[in-house]
Structure formats: structure tokens, C-alpha cells
Amino acid sequence: MIEILMRDIFWSGLAALGFALLFNVPRRTLPGCVIAGAAGHGLRTLLMTGGASIEGATLVGATCIGFLSVYGGRYWHTPPAIFAVSGVIPMIPGRFAYGTMIGLLQLAQLGADTPQTVLVDISVNAIKTALILGALAVGITTPTMLFTRQKPAVKTDP
């Protein structure tokens, strides 16, 4: 299990590095991008091997990336989004989105003769895709909103 986790951390950190280079982030922030991607995806993998659902594990991993992004933004004096975006890219649910699109193409091709299993597969893949993307969005924005707000959320009059 340790070998699988270490391999996952390595490849997800490398993927985060690749996307950070693609987005042309400052060179000095590249280590933070690698750490955010590796830590978030590694935590998700660890939780999933422990029996957690992919949606819940993604929320925890994205929240970890969100906290690391806030810290990295303060440490390197850059916007936290630099670390958050490159860190969550390896957790995008490509397999489920691909399954949804292939199922929709089968649905369009078969029409009314579509077996019920195809409809169930499309629905499950679409729901998982939406939940994972929602978990990514909530996970990376919550720490940022909690710790980087400059003004109070509610104006109080004395």
C-alpha cells in the first residue's frame, strides 16, 4: 500500500507541475504547486484505500489543497489560486466524464432501443462527475474564503 501511495504522490505532483508550467506560473512557486497537487491527491488516495467514497475523499483532498494554497500564497506573496488550480487538476474526474459522454453517444445512436443499463451507467457517471467537481470547488474555495477575506461579510452599524 505504501508503494502505491508513494507512486500516486509522485505522479500527481508531476501532473501538478506540468499544469503549473502550462499555466506559466512564476518559477519560484513551482515547489508549492507540486506540494499542493501531491498532498491533495495523495490524501484522496489514502482515504479511498481506507474505504472512503471518491466524492468524500475528493472533498478532503481539495480542502487540503485549499489550505496549502492559502499558506503558499502568503509564503510566496502570490494569489492562492496559483497553487489551488494546478493542485486540483490531477483530481479532475476524467474517467467518469468520459463514461458519461460515451454513454450519451450510445444513447443518441440507439434511440428508443437503449437498454436500461446504459441509462443507469450514464446517470451514475454524470452524478459522480458533478459531485466530484462540486467537491473540488467547495474544497479549494472554503479555506480561501475563510482566511483571505479583507472586509467583514456583514456590515454592522453602531
Image (spheres, helix red, strand yellow):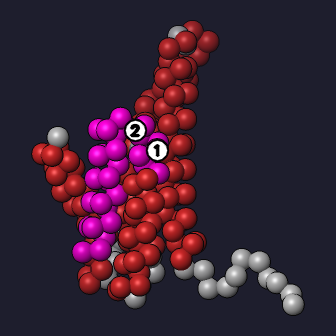
The amino acid type, in three-letter code, at marker 2 is: Ala
Position of residue 128 relative to residue 122, above or below, is below
In magenta segment, residue 42: yes
Disc 2 to disc 1, C-alpha distance = 7 Å
Which span of residues is magenta-colored? Answer: 31-59
Q: In what element is the residue under mark 2?
A: loop
- x, y percent for residue 147: 53, 77
Position of residue 80 relative to residue 110, above or below, is below
Relative placement, left or right, of 149 versus 135 is right
- x, y percent for residue 67: 43, 69
Instruction: Name the image quarter holding residue 12.
Output: bottom left
Q: In what element is the residue under mark 1?
A: helix
In magenta segment, residue 43: yes
Q: Is residue 11 visible?
A: no
Residue 52 tag number: 2
- x, y percent for residue 104: 52, 28
Crowdedness near tag 1: few (<14), some (14–19) or many (≥20) residues, C-alpha within 10 Å: some
Residue at the front extreme? 158
Quadrant in which the N terminus appears: top left
The amino acid type, in three-letter code, at marker 1 is: Gly
Instruction: Name the image quarter holding residue 47.
Output: top left
- x, y percent for residue 136: 48, 54
Magenta portion: prevailing SS class: helix
